[in-house]
Image (cartoon, helix red, strand yellow):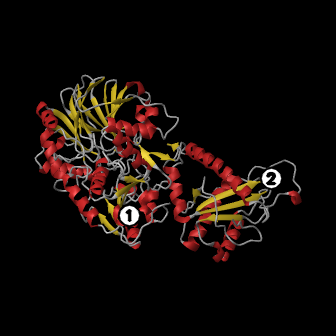
Amino acid sequence: MEIFTNGSSSFSGQGVASGGSRSNFGGRNKRRGAFKGRNTSASRNQKNLPRITKEEDASDIIAKAVKQASLNHKNNNDSKSSASKTKKPSSGKKRQPSRMGGAFSAPTRMHTYKNKPYLKTGKDVDSLSGKGDRLKIMILGGNEEVGRNCTLLEYGKDIIIIDLGLQFPDEDMPGVDYIIPNTSCLKGKEKNIRGVIITHAHLDHIGAIPHVMPRIGNPPLYATDLTGAIIKKRQEDHRGSPPLKLHTIQTKDVLQLGSFKVEFFGVAHSVPTALGIAIHTPCGTIVHTGDFKLDSSDKRQSVEDRDKMIALGKKGVLALMIDSTNACLTGRQIQEGEIQTNIDDIISNAKGRVIIGTFSSMISRIKQIILACEKLDRKVAIEGFSMKSNIAIAQELGYMNIKKGTLIDAKQISNYPPNKIAIVCTGAQGEERAVLMRIANREHSHIEIEPGDTIVFSSSVIPGNERSVQRVKDTLYREGANVVHYNMMDVHAGGHAKQDDLVEMHKMIKPKYLIPIEGHHAFLREHAKAAIAGGFKPEENILIADNGQIIEFDKSGKGQLTNKKVITEYVFVDGLGVGDTNHIVLRDRRELADDGIVIVIAVVEQRTGILLNMPDIISRGFIYMKDNRELIQKSRQKIEDILKDKDPRSSANGTYLKDRIKDELGDFLFHKTQRRPMIMPIVIEV
């Protein structure tokens, strides 16, 4: 690390990345009294004042900087909060309204309700009966994104929750592992929660369980045997969490959870034992499909109880909450039976090794791959901790039968000819640390791409992952591999219904109200358009809710989408921290990634405010300063000019000095470089 002192003019390649604040390039109103309040304490001997030199340990300076910056960050927030309560008198000038609207005037991207619309989607006027309790439905996650699925139903003092999933972070969320539902609306109501029901074992439906369950009082948790076993295994990775009150259910079971009578029906999806749920309430029956597609073939991945669905429609359904993940796609989802032939063909025609990337929870897909390899006498290596765990669970419960000797360890791959090897691994979504990415980057301890390898992406790309998946494909092609993905060949039968399947489900269930769920807002709108084209009437009975928007039903069976909302802001999981990373922290991380940071360290005499040394500068990620020595020197001179004391009789005002450095040095650097680094001024008073 290089620190710029009196005799140095080269910037550091290292820096500090905490507690900073981006400079205000619009400029602030200059305050008078930078040095105010006479200090009557005894004068120090100027010769004995401390000075920062080259020889001083850089780590000491940075440690002081971080500590002071953290305290200042907190104090600045407190002062801004109190200042905002006292408004300045109007100058008489009328402020010009912004010409931009909608997303352009929306709050920071990290807020869950990202685009606060000018047009309200719900009702402000209550049109329901005022007598008795109402059924309230709140989607806490999944209606403005793909993932983080969580639905809450409340009647009187009874609450049930369907799914507790996670959402993988977007590219503008550096350092975040994943996002979980915000359950702050349940604070104080923990005793009213009668149970949490899980529809299936995918992470976007179970991933938040270890984090959320302790926060909501650890209520009973209901899941099928396979889903429950995967949840239990995952819970072992979160030591210190209280044991779950896990109850195993089957499609024939009926639960009475307070005011709610709950029944189940099987749905076809890309993991066994996937469920749909029928909730009988005092206001009517609510059907929640979970993730589903329509597939009645004998090779489907989970049992589809179509007779139960039709029976529910005949009895009368108040509202259908239905999966919209593939609502933008026309036609019908291909059936799983068509996949086996394609997998057989790919593996049999491959002259070298076959490496297949898929989801760790797609147990039936993995089963199909292993079956094809057994037919062709190929050994199979499973790579990925979660995939190995899920296969072991599926074998134990009887959902997967594998011949003895088929599975081998990755270390044994070199013992067999390439045309006798298949590798099944995680990473088909381009995850940075997943197995396929590590293989592509030559970071795996036992597997490297060889010319002639066939790489199969046996999963569709989750919206938002397109760029990372493309990067992996590019790398694999450069290594000489042959890449096959679902756009080239039917190697992935999606687990979500397309438009024609959705319309057929509408006609089977025959709901009075249709509530599209699970997907971006555009997906929900496309679902509504498909429903109307398919004959759903009346159109006003299609309720498209945002996350947190409350849907209400009265006992007469009348429903409304209100404009009332509960809090659904993102809760970030970052390492061991849950909820301690917010949109402000992420904003700072993005700013550091954009233009870097410049730390200014200035030492002033506390009594008089006199600058004692030429200011020191530390930087990271701004520019390569060894090639910009002139800019360094001018920057230090600019800081010296900013800190000149025009009234040596008054003491230093550190807060004012820092604000001036942020504003004026920020303007100076932007003028010189057209870049806006984060400016972190550290004023040490001695």
The residue tagged 2 is: 607
Check whether the beta carbons of the residues at disc 1 and disc 2 lie within 8 A of each other: no
Q: Is residue 232 above or below residue 356?
A: above
Q: Amino acid at mark 2?
A: Arg
Residue 122 falls in which quadrant of the image? top left
What residue is drawn where x is 23% and y is 60%?
Answer: 342
Question: Where is residue 313 drawn, in percent x and y?
Answer: 13, 35
Q: Quadrant of residue 508?
A: top left
Q: Which numbered disc covers residue 467?
A: 1
Residue at the location (20% across, 48% down)?
Answer: 299
**Residue 532 spot, x, y in % from top left:** 14, 48
| Three-letter residue code for mark 1 | Arg
| Residue 25: % across, % down | 55, 63
Quadrant including the N terminus: bottom right
The span from disc 1 to disc 2 (Cα, nearest Å) is 57 Å
Q: Nearer the viewer, mark 1 or mark 2?
A: 1
